[in-house]
Image (cartoon, helix red, strand yellow):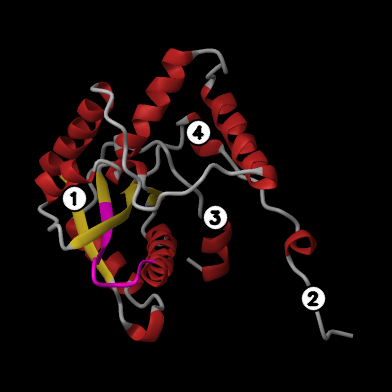
Amino acid sequence: MDILEAIRARKSIRGYKPDPVPRGILREIINIASRAPSAMNTQPWEITVVTGKVLDNIKQGNIDMVSSGTTPEPAVRSKPFEDKYRQRQVELAIQLFGLMGIAREDRVKRAEWWQKGFRFFDAPAAIILSVDRSLEEARSQFDIGTLAQTICLTALNYDLGTCIEDQGVTFPEIVRRFAHIPESQRIVTSIAIGYPNRDFPANRLESKREPVDEIVTWYGFD
């Protein structure tokens, strides 16, 4: 797939077919994506790929934690969005809930949707990205972002969909228990990956982008 076509086509996939993704294809994707840039070529990422029973155990463990009322622990703690950033977040939620037929006052369906994120949106595989705790957080976080985007773009060449989402790893003790990720690594985020279910309503979402002239300031041009 042409790189420009891939950039335009990439979207967050939130519904997958149950078909397993072959290990060989996942290996090819990661091999290519590992060409992503990193500060001074430090390549800070540690990559764990899970599927099958291991992934099922993580999904169930997450749901058990949610059901028990345990508070998730995102890798990067941040304050709530405000102003235009909050508005963009709200617009996305309105689009998603509209496609899924979830009314604002329907707490049951909203809770079911929330839990779906803890199940990696029922993807048949997940890629977990972590970094060594000795590394400076802000810089390694940026590098993880370049790798994640490159994985998502590469996956399109294999007709695979992805969703970068930290929800699946916000109970790190569950992930560590089943994926054997050591405490010396800080779990940053995950990528749900699989063959998209084209009939799943949320996959019809086309999230909006701001016009270039709204986000760019130009200097020194005639």
Highlighted magenta segment, given as a residue range = 127-137
Q: For the point 51% across and 55% down, which residue is it?
A: 10
Note whether 108 is above or below 201 in the view shown. Answer: above
Q: Is residue 60 left or right of residue 76?
A: left
Q: Nearer the viewer, residue 73 or 119?
A: 73
> Which one is closest to the eye, mark 3 or mark 1?
1
For label 1, the crowd category at 10 Å Cα-Cα, with few meaning under 14, some 14 to 19 and many 20 or more, is many
Q: Name the amino acid, label 1.
A: Val
The answer to if 3 sits in the magenta stretch is no
Quarter of the rendering containing residue 132: bottom left
**Label whose residue precedes the other's in the sequence (2 or 1):** 1
Q: Nearer the viewer, residue 207 or 90?
A: 90
Which structural element holds mark 1? strand
| Position in image of residue 80 (x %, y %) | 54, 42
Q: Is residue 139 left or right of residue 62?
A: right
Q: Name the amino acid, label 3.
A: Ala
**Label whose residue precedes the other's in the sequence (4 or 3):** 3
Q: For the point 37% across and 63% down, which residue is it?
A: 151
Separation (CA) of disc 2 from disc 1: 44 Å
Identify residue for label 3. Answer: 9
> Which one is closest to the eye, mark 4 or mark 3?
4
**Label whose residue precedes the other's in the sequence (3 or 2):** 3
Q: Name the amino acid, label 4.
A: Ala
Marks 1 and 4 in Cβ contact (< 8 Å)? no
| Position in image of residue 39 (x %, y %) | 40, 81
Identify residue for label 1. Answer: 50
Identify residue for label 2. Answer: 218
Quarter of the rendering containing residue 59: top left
